[in-house]
Amino acid sequence: MRAGPSDFSVVAIIAAYNEADLIGQVVGDLIEQGVQVYLLDDGSTDGTVAAVEPYRGRGLLGVEQVADDGRPSDGFEWERILRRKAQLAGELDADWFIHHDADEFRESPWPHLSLGGAIRAVDALGFNAIDSARLDFWPIDDGFRPGDDVRRAFTHYAAPAPYDRLQIRYWKKTDAVVDLASSGGHEVRFPGRRVFPIRFLLRHYPIRGQAHGERKVFKERRARFLARERARGWHVQYDTVREGASFIHDPATLTRYDADAVRLAMMLRHRGVEELEEALDARLAEAERLRADLDKPTAEIAELRHALDARDATIADLQAATEDGARRLDAVYRSLSWRLTAPARAVGRLLRRRRA
């Protein structure tokens, strides 16, 4: 299936489950930016599929039900979805693909280029994969309603958790089957991968209000996560959320979104800078280890010197005591009482010899 008539085509493969309040905006934005869409619906019950129907024939290539392969689904089978996305990347005739979520918007790092135009520029530079700088936007009030522009409504964000920072989800079509599943979808893997150093922008909107958060976390996500996937360390993003918790965030704990500042930071702290910092940190750690190894003999020598000094002090004390004893004995020998009692001591020695 050819993605489209352009001589350069990009397809975002999106998996969705009950995202009707947002999926239309996501799909429409991608198409407006020159990216076509293939939707995998995981059995939505809220009108998700109906929300994207207006885009059929206008950039929406197809809608596929995940469970339509003949196997019944026993929950949210993330690995199954990832493997299907990798398979589709081999079947669809496009130049680049994006492993895309239903609650995120992707943007070029350059304001003058659309997402499709930016991917084309990266391709021309000889790279075949792209990372993203993810920002998690959270509600600071409960005013969002379906149909509202989510990017206008949500003005504050936080950095993602460490396990969500790696986002290598763009790739150039390859003859090899790409691997999305082994990383849990965090990065696409294939031979000869060359990741562009500047990250693209990823604006993520996982929770849109209190009622949405309660429904999504406690009914539509946790209840459907599979034990075998949880055992692999997947689906941990809601582990700390408890029943009755507020999904509305204090803006003082978040950062107000400034597009220019975010893009400048992306340019200044690109992957090349971070790789250099990591290499320098490794060199410093090695230098500290070598210094510790060099300091170890020095410490041992210092300890030996301390023991020798203690021994010398003990010897000096013994010598002083011996000299003092000799002086005392010499004083006794020179005393008048010693000389006057000398005859008596001689008689005593003579009698002892005779008795012996």
Image: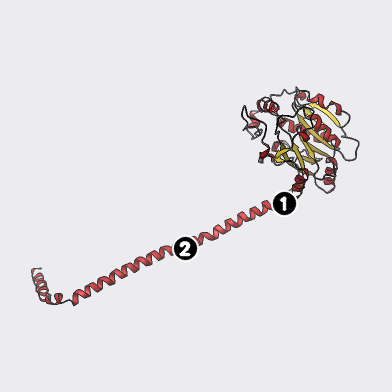
Q: Which mark is residue 226?
A: none
Residue 249 horizontal/vertical position (percent): 67, 34
Residue 277 horizontal/vertical position (percent): 68, 52
> Judging from the image, what secondary structure is the residue with disc 1 in?
helix
Instruction: Give the image quarter of residue 292.
Output: bottom right
Could you tell which of marks 2 and 1 lies nearer the N-terminus? 1
Residue that appears at 33% across and 67% down: 317
Q: Is residue 102 above or below residue 326?
A: above
Mark 2, residues whose alpha carbon is within 10 Å: few (<14), some, or many (≥20)?
few
- Quadrant placement of the N terminus: top right
Q: Is residue 71 left or right of residue 246?
A: right
Give the residue type at disc 2: Ala
Question: Which is more toward the observer, 204 or 139?
Answer: 139
Give the residue type at disc 1: Val
Question: Which is more toward the observer, 72 or 217?
Answer: 217
> Judging from the image, what secondary structure is the residue with disc 2 in?
helix
Q: Is residue 271 above or below residue 226?
A: below
Question: Which is more toward the observer, 280 or 151?
Answer: 151
Instruction: Give the image quarter of residue 79.
Output: top right
Which of discs 2 and 1 lies nearer the camera? The answer is 1
Question: Which is more toward the observer, 333 or 172?
Answer: 333
Residue 107 visible to an observer of this rendering: yes
Residue 66 horizontal/vertical position (percent): 76, 26
Residue 220 visible to an observer of this rendering: no
Judging by the rendered image, the residue that carries numbered circle 2 is 302
Judging by the rendered image, the residue that carries numbered circle 1 is 273
Mark 1, residues whose alpha carbon is within 10 Å: few (<14), some, or many (≥20)?
some
Residue that appears at 61% across and 55% down: 286
Q: CA distance from mark 2 to mark 1?
A: 42 Å
**Circle 2/circle 1 CB separation < 8 Å:** no
Q: Is residue 64 left or right of residue 299?
A: right
Instruction: Give the image quarter of residue 321.
Output: bottom left
